[in-house]
Amino acid sequence: MSEQVIVVGGGVIGLTTALTLAERGLRVRVWSREAVTETTSAVAGALWWPYRIEPEAEAGAWALASLRVYERLADDPLGTGVRMVPGVHADTVLGNLGDWAREVSGLRQLAAGEVPGPYRVGLAARLPLIDMPVHLEWLRARFEAAGGVVERRAVTGFGEAAERARVVVDCAGLGARELVPDAGLRPVRGQLVLVENPGIEEWFTAADAASSDTTYFFPQPGRLILGGTAQEGDERLGADPATAAAIVARCARVRPEIAGARVLGHRVGLRPARSGGVRIEAERLPGGGRLVHNYGHGGAGVTVAWGCARSAADLATG
């Protein structure tokens, strides 16, 4: 076998897992159907926050492990794409969050008059905000510096990877629905609008887990990202003009200057949600190889990437 490990999937989960394995001294190759900057991960907002992810206890630990990494990476924002940025989570009560929230410094419950827009409850925080195209390129460069290889390659089954490597790591995201196969995987469509930033320096979110409509804006270099949607079972990849107009209108209710911002573009991504939550486990392949699964992160892949990578790497090397 020419490779010790092949990681299937080149998004943030796949690259972070591959990097973790490579820096443990393994020979690692990533097989990715799309270019790194064309994956679903490249579309993400991407604010660190455990959002719509299960199982809750494990997700909190994975998220905190990732938070500590992002806090360090924020020392080099131009290189890594990670910045620590203040903002507000509307409709969020500190006491309703999981145990993980006690480990996040600076979370503060806001008085009604401090919450922007038509909201009476909110939480202030200073959190990692990741410029995903920059971060994905940084992950790839660091992975390659550790001896890893990224290869554009569509995969029709894990058997072809198992012929080349003793360990195969499944970071295929929504693609695992057919590769595993796993009928519990479902797409959750997210649509974004990119506009010129009219001077907004803080992020904002108002995300009702029971609704397919969310409201958020994230100031990224050269643009303001507006969102969003969480449309379960919707696999449309084209941007819907009516949805885009509604997103702008919702964000403008919080910051009126957004209404007049020039539109730079639209983005759509399919989050890989899974019944039962994230799957990180190992199984034997015919011939004695090992298949490690690491998929089903929904809209929180960036938030838990490093914690999940370490758990998957432990299974791959144990």
Image (cartoon, rainbow, N blue to C red):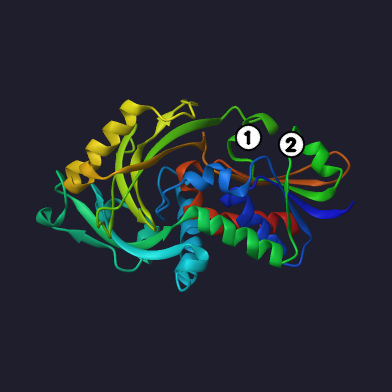
| x then y, percent, for residue 283 | 74, 43
Which residue is at a point 83% across and 50% down the rendered structure image? 166
Q: Does the rendering let one see residue 232?
A: yes
Q: Is residue 251 left or right of residue 244?
A: left
Q: CA distance from mark 2 to mark 1?
A: 9 Å
Helix, strand or loop for disc 2: loop
Q: Is label 2 in contact with label 1 (beta carbons under 8 Å)? A: yes
The image quadrant that residue 23 belongs to is bottom right
Q: Quick one: label 2 or label 1, which is nearer the N terminus?
A: 2
Q: Amino acid at mark 2?
A: Val
Q: Quadrant of the C terminus?
A: bottom right
Q: Does the rendering let one see residue 58?
A: no
Q: Is residue 228 left or right of residue 296?
A: left
Q: Amino acid at mark 1?
A: Gly
Which residue is at a point 28% across and 32% down the rendered structure image? 245
Q: Nearer the viewer, residue 167 or 61?
A: 167
Q: Give above or below for 69 relative to 172.
A: below
Q: Nearer the viewer, residue 312 or 2?
A: 2
| x then y, percent, for residue 289 | 83, 46
Q: Would you name the residue on which mark 1 appears?
A: 175
| x then y, percent, for residue 277 | 52, 40
Which residue is at a point 50% across and 31% down the rendered structure image? 187
Which residue is at a point 17% across and 58% down the rendered structure image? 110
Q: Is residue 57 left or right of residue 222?
A: right
Q: Would you name the residue on which mark 2 appears?
A: 155
